[in-house]
Amino acid sequence: MTIMWRMAAMVAFLGVPAACSGETPGAVRSPTPPVSPAATASAPPTTSPTPSDPIKQSRRWKDIKVPKLTSASGMIEVKAPGPRDAWAIGFEDSADDELGWGVLLRWDGSTWARVPLPWNRLEHLSALDVDGQDDVWISAGSKLARRSGGRWRTFKPFGIAENFFFRDIAVDKGRAVLLGDGPQLPFVVRWDGRKFTMQDYYDGARLNAISFKSGHEWIVGATDHLKCEGVTPEIWHRGPAHTNWNGQVPHVRGGVLKSVWQTDPDDVWAVGEISSSEQERDYQSGECIDKRSDVPPVPLVMHWDGAAWKSVKLPAWNVSLTSVTAAGKNHVWASGVGPADEIVFLHYDGEKWTREDRRGAAESSVNTTTIPGTSDLWSVGTINGTTDDAQAFVLRRR
């Protein structure tokens, strides 16, 4: 794969030590990742109930009260560094043509409360990650903020440019990796504690989510193929020695990965969906666009065992998976949205997959995370997410 560098103008903004709000660090680009050999190892064993088994509404998932949000509100992401500490981002006052104002919430072990944002005006938040009880990163468009020691520090890695959009953040021991979309190419930005550096990715790559732990970066997404042949899953890896490679995955036509989680370097999970991969070329832009299809998506789950990526067999459930989390190799949860917009949770116990549903019209993604030190989970999202009646939900499973 050829990496295409098209952001020479960013040299002035990335690669120099960063300071407080308004500072503009500059660009150092990483070398082109070599492609790894194809994976050959087997997938973890799975045995599953038949698709005809009735799916009961789970009573384990309880609605948790949050501070009152204004109309057209929703939640985007939740992270929990411990049983008495969790953070969540969301929005309120959204509309058909407006993203809405950002909302940051914190759980103190008994209640959720609002936390003031670090910017002078309200911003739509796009990503969140937490490293310990008091190291929080959030993004809003092309801007970043880090909360440490109870104080916020803000960054503008791209200076005054606003045509960059962060999609996801992952932090580990004071370092951070962020990915997003630029005016021409998707990008990855790394923070080493002093400065930001940037790596562009090739045209056609979709970077959707990142996990960063023990020096291992895992990025998942998809690749648009030439001649409008549809998309297939892609996974990229960068190890502690700063070596880059493209971790080849099974060729799944129409497959897109949306979330990734690692419990250790030999246990990584990625989830998404497989949908109709039919595409056509837009006569104005010349780009390939997905055709609309009435065929519901099916879940896509992939697992890395330290040697290879393999697709994991699931029952014939129609669900678009948007989040994965795990507390160990035998305690994996994936969440998403079903064909009737129901909230869906899939659990793997090391032997079989089971499904739990929760009533609701979750028309946007569902985000779920484990709670360290417990077997509980947090899950957030939006009901009626594309209407003026959109409503945030926060669930906890005990």
Image (cartoon, helix red, strand yellow):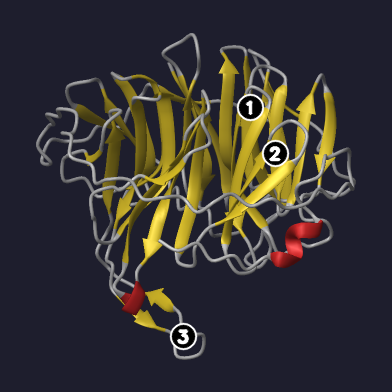
Earlier residue among tags 3 and 2:
2
Provide the residue designation for mark 2: 138
Q: Quadrant of residue 99?
A: bottom right
Q: Residue 143 or 72: which is nearer the viewer?
A: 143
Identified at 17% across, 22% down, the residue is 351
Residue 169 point in image, percent of width and height: 60, 39
In this view of the protein, can residue 343 be seen by the observer? no
Question: Which part of the image, by quadrant, shows the C terminus?
Answer: top left
Q: CA distance from mark 2 to mark 1?
A: 9 Å
Q: Which mark is residue 115?
A: none
Disc 1 residue type (three-letter): Val
Residue carrying label 1: 130
Q: Secondary structure at mark 1?
A: strand
Give the residue displayed 45% in from the left and 53% down from the top. Answer: 363
In this view of the protein, can residue 150 be seen by the observer?
A: yes
Which mark lies nearer to you, 3 or 2? Answer: 3
Three-letter residue code for mark 3:
Gly
Horizontal side, residue 186 vs residue 250: left or right: right
